[in-house]
Amino acid sequence: MEVAVKKLLKSYHLRSTPVRKQVLDLFIQTSHALGKANIEAELDEIDRITLYRTLRTFEQKGIIHQAIDGSGKTKYALCSHECSEHEHHDHHAHFYCTRCEKTVCMNSITVPKIDIPDDFQIASAQLILSGTCKNCQR
Ligand SMILES: [Zn+2]
Ligand SMILES: [Zn+2]
Ligand SMILES: [Zn+2]
């Protein structure tokens, strides 16, 4: 894993730092989106400002995207391979579980094209689904 993470960072022209490696590794290991609080809870004694910067860098590089779920909390999830620097293609739905408050990327569900009146221009569109995840249905 250590080697894979290093390679991945290198492929994005990012220097390997302990925080970058830890954070990227955490995203790879986790199947749901992560908020800052989640990351801080998982990684002991991580400096908040360094974490904030790392997330911003990763987002700019097309490694992670914001998983908007209507909860008002900023969460991030790993991008697909189509994303690149300053160009995200994460036009998929996000599922928010109202019980465990976890958010998951629904990569197979794309946001449909929406016809809006000519006076408006869409810059972004979010498709948010909410309900209960598999774990919470038991
Ligand atoms: Zn992306
Ligand atoms: Zn759940
Ligand atoms: Zn997503």
Image (tube, rainbow, N blue to C red):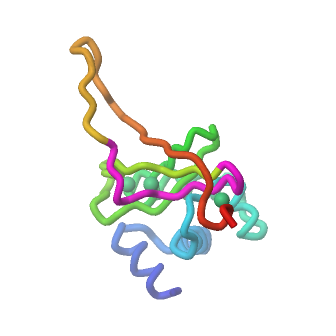
The image quadrant where one finds the C terminus is bottom right
Q: Residue furthest left?
A: 118
User: In this picture, is 60 found above or below 8?
Assistant: above
Q: Is residue 83 magenta?
A: no
Q: How many marks?
A: 0
Q: Is residue 99 magenta?
A: yes
Quadrant housing residue 35:
bottom right
Residue plotted at (67% across, 48% down): 98
Q: In the image, 15: left or right of 133?
A: left
Residue extending furthest toward the top: 119
For residue 62, side relative to residue 117 (left or right)? right
- Which residue is at the front of the view, 113 or 34? 113
Residue 88 percent across, percent down from the top left: 33, 50
Observer-nearest of 69 and 74: 69
Counting from the top left corner in percent of width and height, residue 39 is at 67, 62
Residue 48 location (% of width, % of height): 70, 54
Compared with 64, 110 (above or below) is above
Residue 68 horizontal/vertical position (percent): 51, 44
State the residue at coordinates (35%, 63%).
80
In depth, the one of 40 and 89 nearer the eye is: 89
Above or below, comparing residue 116 to residue 49 in the picture:
above
Quarter of the rendered structure image containing ligand 2: bottom right
Which image quadrant for residue 9? bottom left
Q: Residue at x 31, y 27 (%)?
A: 122
Which span of residues is magenta-colored? 98-111
Name the residue at 54% across, 55% down. Answer: 55
